[in-house]
Every structure is written in structure tokens, then in C-alpha cells.
Image (cartoon, rainbow, N blue to C red):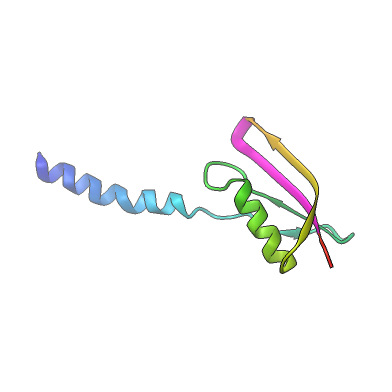
Amino acid sequence: MKFVLIGLFALALPGCAQLMHGEQQPVVPKGNGEYYTSCSGAVEDWNSCHVKARKACAGEYETIKKNESAVGGRRELTFQCVR
């Protein structure tokens, strides 16, 4: 029984590690100087949205719109780079 539990744990561990580094949504240009990204679900949070905005702008950005829905943990950020 002990070996079965160890085996199950060993099989489950890589699956948990994959959940910790889930697929992040890309930053999408809206064409008017604004960008859009989402950071939804359990894998991402508001901080990951802000990190993506800083990377896309190579520094500072201005938040245009921030939207959050409790259903499904949906978070959306529209931003513009500060030049």
C-alpha cells in the first residue's frame, strides 16, 4: 500500500507543476495605441496582467480600463504605453 501511494504521488506531481505554469494570454494591440490582455482564472492574477503590460511597454504604462468578474475569475486590462 505504501508503494502504491508513493507511485500515485510521483505521477500526480508533474501534473500539479504544469498547473502552476499554465498558459498566459498574450497582449493584443487594439490599433489605437491601446493594448488589451486578460489574466483570468487560478493561474494568473492582477500582478501577471501588470507584468505583461510593463513588458509590452518596456516600462511605464497607463491603465485605460480594468474589468473583473467574480464568475470564473475573469480579469481584463486595457492599457496604453507612456512615452
Q: Is residue 69 left or right of residue 32?
A: left
Please state if 19 lies on the left or on the right of 80 as rendered.
left
At x 63% / y 54%, what residue is drawn? 25
Q: Is residue 1 above or below residue 20?
A: above
Q: Which residues are magenta?
A: 71-80
Location of the N terminus by quadrant is top left
Observer-nearest residue: 62 or 31? 62
24 vs 61, nearest the viewer: 61
Q: How would you classify the magenta stretch by its main secondary structure?
A: strand
What is the tally of numbered marks visible in this picture? 0
- Which residue is most to the right? 32
* Residue at the extreme top: 71
Residue 57: quarter of image: bottom right
Q: Is residue 38 magenta?
A: no
Location of residue 77 in the rendering, given as x and y in whole percent from the top left corner: 73, 48
Going 84% across and 68% down the picture, which residue do you hit? 83
Q: Residue at x 82, y 63 (%)?
A: 82
Q: Position of residue 51 (x, y in %)?
A: 64, 58
Residue 28 visible from this viewpoint:
yes
Q: Residue shown at 77%/59% (left/top)?
A: 61
Residue 26 shows in this picture: no
Q: In the displayed structure, would residue 36 be above or below residue 74?
A: below
User: In the rendering, at what x and y percent does residue 45 appear?
Assistant: 59, 46
